[in-house]
Image: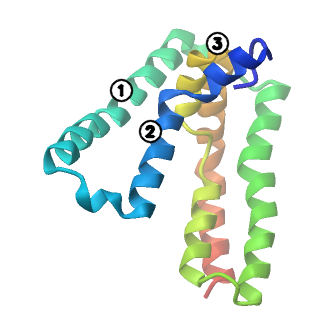
Amino acid sequence: FLAGSFAPRDLFRRLLSPGLVATVTAIVVVTTGAVQYQPPLVNKVLGTLGAATMPIAMMLAGAQIGLLGRRALVFDRWNLQLAGVRVLVIPLILGAIAVVLHHYGLVPREALIIFMLVNLMPASINSIGLAIRFKSAPSRAAQAVVMTHLVSVVTVIAGVILIGVLFR
């Protein structure tokens, strides 16, 4: 999003991406209850289109990683720092917040567990598609995905064990 020109027109065009428009529209339709008035055909069409999203994103990410070949896994300072922040620092900070929320009973236990599990996950495959879309270093995004997935083999297991201990 932050790559490229900061002219208001360019920022507006990047902000109104199809994904953001679709997400905001879906949130409004569901939270207002308008979804109950939606014709079954619309549900069918949107369901069919939505089902194609993940396979297409995986093919796009796989193609970008495939183009890099062995360069997809780079142990340089940038990738190591990114992996450390994504799979260690962020989950630890948010974990501390979750423990406080749990201690004071402000959020249901199940919601906190889901929150923590989501935050343990590595960099999203979608980041590659977004980097391509916004012309913002797709090869770096692919390297980030590969590196964080590699590191998460250990950190996710450790995190799940820690969640089990903290949220009994």
Q: How far, Cα to Cα, is label 3 from label 2?
A: 21 Å
Query: Mark 3 or mark 1, which is nearer to you?
Result: 3
The image shows residue 105, relative to residue 64, as above or below, that is below
Q: How far, Cα to Cα, is label 1 from label 2?
A: 17 Å
Q: Quadrant of residue 114?
A: bottom right
**Circle 1 crowding by C-alpha within 10 Å: few under 14, some 14–19, many from 20:** few
Question: Front-most of 106 and 11?
Answer: 11
Query: Mark 1 or mark 2, which is nearer to you?
Result: 2
- Is residue 113 found left or right of 37 in the rendered image? right
Name which residue type carries label 2: Ala
Q: Position of residue 35 (x, y in %)?
A: 31, 57
Residue at which label 2 appears: 22
Q: Earlier in the sequence, mark 3 or mark 1?
A: 1
Residue at which label 1 appears: 56
Label 3's element?
loop
Which quadrant, please, contains the C terminus? bottom right
- Is residue 8 found left or right of 130 in the rendered image? right
